[in-house]
Image (tube, rainbow, N blue to C red):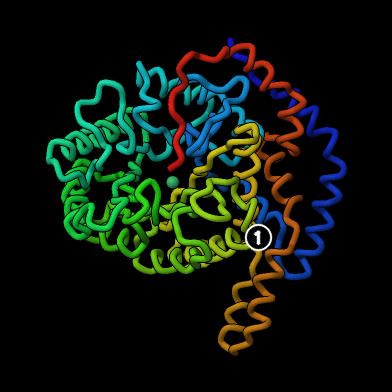
Amino acid sequence: MPYQIAADFIAAANHRHSRDLQRDYEALGERLARQDIAIDRLTARAQTFAVAIPSWGVGTGGTRFARFPGPGEPRNVYEKLEDCHTVQQLCRATPTVSLHFPWDRPGDVQALREQASAYGLGFDAVNSNTFQDQPGQARSYKFGSLTHGDAEVRAQAIAHNLDCIELGRKLGAKALSVWIGDGANFPGQHNLRAALERYLRSTSEIYAAVPEDWLMYIEHKLFEPAFYATVLNDWGTSLACATQLGPKAKCLVDLGHHAPNTNIEMIVARLVQFGKLGGFHFNDSKYGDDDLDSASIHPFQLFLVFNELVDAAQREGDGFKPAYMLDQSHNVTDPIESLMSSAIEVQRAYIQACSVNRKVLADYQDGNDALMAAKTLKKAFTTDVQPILDMARQRNGGAVDPIGCYRASAYRKQKAEERPPLKTVSGSGIV
Ligand SMILES: [Mn+2]
């Protein structure tokens, strides 16, 4: 039986924090009450906030140069689920897992579904992979997949996506995410328009197989691995393609897939306005698609993204449910710690955005009071909502101090003993 952190271990750890947390929570409650904000309403929102874990996130990531594996890394999809369970057990904001095929293809699909269910986990969007070749694959994706000039390569890539849908159906997933690395490294390498025409033809065939109660997320990316021209390169192209594909197709925004200094919150507002915002891949970056931990570089940007999302939720009502997932590469940290920390940072941005006084903000906007409008947002951003996040975790049965509790449990040491490294380690991706 694999090691798990015991519930009474978490309860004992929480007990040591409970008095300080109660005091901090009451002090923040008083402060928020002066702004007519009921702290328990924010806590209730934090308790229902959810962001999916990518199965590849529990393994150590890598760069273009090397990967330095850590001890006790999961060696298969079942062990990945174990780690996802631990993340959720402690931080209570990550109830679903997003699988990537063929990396996570289970031998027994039903057994995997039952294992997830035993852990209290569900499955988020399934991800296809046509950006690398698999052993024994008939045709290579070296020069593209869904947009390749050769119809047989395209057919193979389409068939893989249909297979992903079928696996996802059996697992109870409700969405397919499609990111392709297709593009050109040299001017003239491919015809810019013809490549996108092939993209639309291929994705139309996939779209036709997407079940009626599913969504198909298409994910744009400015560059990399194609360094001159990526086929689905920006949100405008993504919006045009999702519109042409139909109502089940929506745009996925990966925070790292834009040029530096791009106003991403504005992209969010645009996609919401046209009904095409599918969801997010959260991460952070300094230079490119760095896949750093969420809010480690640009916490204010993350807050501004959520400011748009909270505004959108008010306007659009219950039907507005973008999919949230972390998509990070943990190269120098324990992946479980990075995932817990990142999930809480995304949750923090959401709660800060929920505490914006939207009536006051709208009045300043109407009165062209730029300074006070900006300060209204800053006030929410600079409010330390940590006691709300800690209380939400405690009320949901998680750990008040997830990383402290995780380290004290020696989980990683246990896994290092249970999981001796395999000779060949399945690929982790930066997507
Ligand atoms: Mn992504």
> Type of residue at label 1?
Gln
Q: Which residue is drawn at 29% across and 47% down?
A: 182
Locate residue 184 relative to residue 312 in the image: left or right.
Answer: left
> Can residue 199 be seen at all in this image of the molecule?
yes
How far across and down, in percent of the image, does residue 262 sit?
A: 49, 66
Q: Which residue is drawn at 47% across and 25% down?
A: 116
Locate residue 11 relative to residue 234 in the image: left or right.
Answer: right
In the rendered image of this protein, does residue 29 appear above or below residue 225?
below
Q: Quadrant of residue 385?
A: bottom right
How far across and down, in percent of the image, does residue 228 sit?
A: 34, 55
Residue pointed to by mark 1: 352
Mark 1: secondary structure: helix
How far across and down, in percent of the image, does residue 70 sit?
A: 61, 25
Q: What crowding class fits label 1: few (fewer than 14 Cα within 10 Å), some (14-19), or many (20 or more)?
A: many
Q: Residue at x 21, y 47 (%)?
A: 147
- Look at the image and tell me in which quarter the C terminus lies: top left
Locate residue 361 relative to residue 386 in the image: left or right.
Answer: left
Image label count: 1
- Observer-nearest residue: 179 or 343? 179
How far across and down, in percent of the image, does residue 287 sit?
A: 54, 55
- Look at the image and tell me in which quarter the N terminus lies: top right
- Observer-nearest residue: 28 or 141? 141
- Observer-nearest residue: 173 or 223? 223
Point out the residue furthest to the left here. Answer: 151
Q: In which quarter of the image is residue 102?
A: top left
- Observer-nearest residue: 14 or 216? 216
> Can residue 58 be seen at all in this image of the molecule?
no
